[in-house]
Image: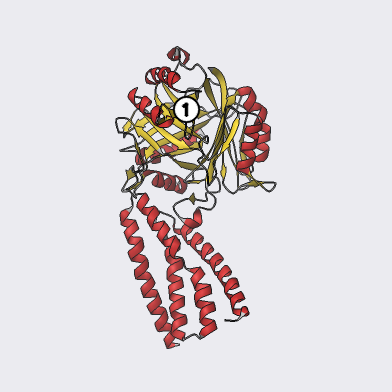
Amino acid sequence: MSALAWLGVALLGGIASVARFELDRVVQLRIGGEFPFGTLVVNTVGSFALGVLTGLGATDDTAVLAGTATLGSFTTFSTWMLETERLGEDGESAYSAANIAVSIACGLCAAGAGWALGAAL
Amino acid sequence: MNDDCLKLTVYFGESDRVGGHLLSNRLLEVYERHRTKASLLLRAVEGFGLKHKLHTQRLLTLSEDLPLVSIAVDSRERIEGMLDEVVGLVGDGLVTLERARLLTGEIGGPLPAALPHEQTKLTVYLGRQERVGRRPAYLHVVDLLRRHRVAGASVLLGVDGVVHGSRERARFFARNAEVPLLVVAVGDVSAVAPALDELDGSLADPLLTLERVRVLKRDGRLFAPPPRVADADEHGLAIWQKLTVYAGEQSRHGGHPLYIELVRRLRRAEASGATALRGIWGYSGEHAPHGDTFWSIRRRVPVLALLVDAPEEVQRLWPIVDELTDETGLVTSELVPALQAAGGGARSGGLRLASRLHRP
């Protein structure tokens, strides 16, 4: 990988994580409540975008830049896990389990739909 | 005992800064420089202020600027002496002054005669690893209070503070033995007085305060709604009211944690603010003391949720508090004789003490 691609990874990754932070916060403040909708929306959107990208058949550097750098830092596994654990701490075991199940369901559907869309384009 | 003491409380944000320094740090520096008898910095788990922006440790993106509460207790003279400096530092935030009795050294004695009211709030300031015999002092104090049938007690861990004039702050890699914590208890004076006598004999260097309080509800039983107080004293100085809900993390309303529901409902009702603080140990009424256990994911620690507002606002918001505490929780009301609030460009209140005439 070229130095330029590395630079791109750093730059795009940075921008994407800021975008994730903002989207997460806006969604959470808009919807409110206990359930971490912000993270769910972020991860679903990210899965969809990665699906589209893969469906399009992106090549080497593009795939690294858009997939690993941008979407990799846009979506967040650690926050998803942390918030699930916090729900457990609060005794919200139903929400805790739902956060896992709904995220997986939404993520898989979004990635699948994205892939289909990308392949059709 | 010093009857003429004040408790200065500042509610602000963790990331608030003044002149490039963290506000929390600057405030504690002021308390340290004035060799304050007791001060403590508490980190809340959830809350909102005048801007109605929710901060909570539950959701990562909303946890970057958690509410902080700093408390400083000393003689009226000392507190008033540092007031201008403190107010000068605080931008957006809430500053309150409350009357308190400060007890140091010999704390026992004829307490009931000195307290004309029936219920009192006792706050004991301790070091995090202070011990009585071989046990942590806070466990000893909680057990003692429970044995004397004081209605409830919660232990709150400070992250920074000044005890007997010396600064002790928590660090990431340290034992943090001297960092202060407080035990806050509410009960009848007839139960607290003998507890104080016994505390006197067991603590090496006791430092505690007594404040006037009224218990409104306990475990769903209503004793009295928040008293209707005048909105100003005879000189026109505004009077404010504080409601506190002491509940367990496991306390629930409609299947959800009580404190989360309470903060959410108060925010939706456009209250001017609410703050929730999580303790590490405590009890209420007949229930056994509880805290977290190693093998449980679910937390069992006490949580305090509080709001300070104008008397008419407290009356407006009371139905929400009343509804949510229909089964559990200890609810108290206190008078706040001075308050200054700023947020979103607005500033209200002032820090001249309203007179004592009005009962809580």
Residue B215 in view (yes/no):
no
Residue at point 60%, 31% (across, down)? B166
Residue at far front of view:
B134
| Image color mode | secondary structure
Residue at far right of view:
B19
Q: Would you place residue A93 above or below residue A9 in this image?
A: above
Residue A82 on image: x %, y %: 42, 57
Q: Chain of mark 1?
A: B
Residue with the mark numbered 1? B124
Q: How many numbered discs? A: 1
Secondary structure state at the residue bearing disc 1: strand
Q: Would you place residue B67 above or below residue A70 in this image?
A: above
**Residue type of the residue flagged with mark 1:** Val
Residue B3 on image: x %, y %: 54, 18
Query: Which of the 4 quarters of the picture holds residue A31?
Result: bottom left
**Counting other residues with Cα less than 10 Å from the Cα at mark 1, is it few (<14), some (14-19), or many (20 or more)?**
many
Residue B89 on image: x %, y %: 66, 40
Residue at point 52%, 51% (across, down)? B53
Residue B256 on image: x %, y %: 34, 48
Residue at point 40%, 44% (across, down)? B259
